[in-house]
Image (tube, rainbow, N blue to C red):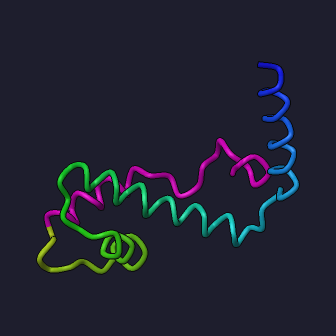
Amino acid sequence: MIEILKQIDKLQGEINRFRPLDKKLLKQIREYYRVGVTYSSNALEGNSLTESETKIVLEEGITPHSAYRDYATLELLNSRLPTTNPTYSETSCF
């Protein structure tokens, strides 16, 4: 068990060498996960939007005509997602 904890500490040190993350990179990571998590969550609920369509809806506000019902669901979920995460700072997130 102690060896595992030492390995974890070593790996955490390697991760910490990359901190703080560049603000542009951090924004890209957050957007990547925002789209991915929104898509996955909606897909589990039966939403028919593709991941690309989900990205377009979230970033551009453009809705595929055939998927208006799915768009409404997506917008409801998206309105509840914070655009920033106050729990994490640039030095503690990722």
Image location (x, y in percent) of residue 15: 80, 51
Which residue occupies the foreground of this view, 13 or 82? 13
- Of all residues, the one furthest to the top in this rendering is 1
Q: Residue at x 11, y 77 (%)?
A: 66
Image location (x, y in percent) of residue 22: 78, 68
Magenta segment includes 53: no
Specify the quadrant of the image occupied by residue 26.
Answer: bottom right
Magenta segment includes 81: yes
**What range of the chain is rendered magenta?**
69-94
Specify the quadrant of the image occupied by residue 11.
Answer: top right
Image location (x, y in percent) of residue 12: 81, 42
Quarter placement of the N terminus: top right
Q: Residue at x 25, y 49 (%)?
A: 44
Instruction: Answer left or right for 63 relative to 41.
Output: left
Q: Residue at x 32, y 51 (%)?
A: 41
Q: Residue at x 24, y 77 (%)?
A: 63
In this view, 85 is above or below 65: above
Instruction: Answer left or right for 89 relative to 79.
Output: right
In this view, 29 is above or below 16: below
In this view, 13 is above or below 4: below
Image location (x, y in percent) of residue 25: 69, 69
Which residue occupies the foreground of this view, 36 or 1? 1
Instruction: Answer left or right for 92 relative to 47.
Output: right
